[in-house]
Amino acid sequence: MIEAQQSESPSGTRVAPRYSSRLAGTRLWASRYLSREERDALEAAVVSTRSVNANTDLVREGERTDTLFIVADGWACRYTTTREGGRQLPALLVPGDVGNLDSLMFDRLDYGVRTLIQATIVALPRDRALALAAQHPGIARTFTWAALVENVILSKWALSLGRRSAKERLAHLLCELSVRLDAEAGNESSFAFPLTQEQVADALGLTSVHVNRTMQQLRTEGMIATANRTMTLPDVAGLRQIGGFDPRYLHADPSTEAQAA
């Protein structure tokens, strides 16, 4: 049996039980499709857990890799670059996310994966993951579910880039992070926000100056407050209305075995 103990994550997620499993708290572990036996099989397939410094590439854009990198703690991102050096972040990775799920099927990544702050990274070899998926239907469904959720998140981000104003983009992103970090309590939310304005700009397709101006506007309106790298949303419902945010696309499921434990 996996035992739990109370602990607080330096990355700012809510205080929650922490388990002896190296995959506890990740999206794979929390999948409602997994049986206890399948969770144990996934855990046994992990080859390493290591601490990685901020701004370190786990895999560079265009490189080959045969390993899945899972963010157990800390923040990371996927990034792509233009020939002129412009950078876009198509995904922000928070504790629990798989950095490169595409590596299940593709040898070469068309994006890079980099830590944004110091992070704990779990390595799961592709050949072991595929073997488990072939043996266990729940693991196969979990990989499929994770990929589909990533796809719909990317679709929402594309909508923001193409059709939302800067204010709406930022509001939508903050609402999404609030849900993904399970940080909401009633109509309020508070979570660690280690991103620089440049990183936010790269995620939203804006300039750092525009991000700064938009944050100031939301502060003035009482929609956000920041202090000590912590983001507070005093009026979640109001911010959702500004960003046109509907959390159902994230398919969050509070009834998983890991959360129930």
Image (spheres, rainbow, N blue to C red):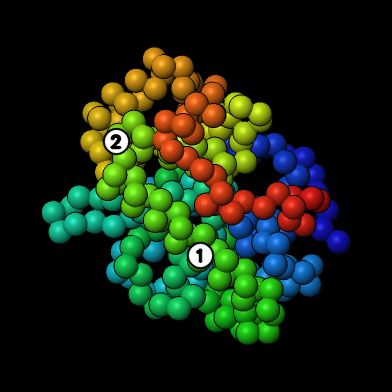
- On screen, residue 74 versus residue 210, left or right, reads right
Q: Is residue 254 visible?
A: yes
Of residues 65 and 37, which is closer to you in this image? 37
Q: Is residue 48 above or below residue 55?
A: below
Sequence-wise, which precedes: disc 2 or disc 1?
1
Q: Secondary structure at mark 2?
A: loop
Examine the image and state in which quarter residue 141 appears. Answer: bottom right
User: Label 1 belongs to which residue?
Assistant: 148
Label 1 SS: helix
Residue 166: percent from left, percent from top: 30, 34
- Dot 2 crowding, Cα within 10 Å, few <14, some 14–19, many 20+: few
At label 1, counting other C-alpha atoms closer than 10 Å, the crowd grade (few under 14, some 14-19, many 20 or more) is: few
Where residue 174 sits: x, y (%)? 46, 36
**Residue annotated with mark 2:** 165
Q: Residue at x 77, y 57 (%)?
A: 257
Report the amino acid beneath label 2.
Ser
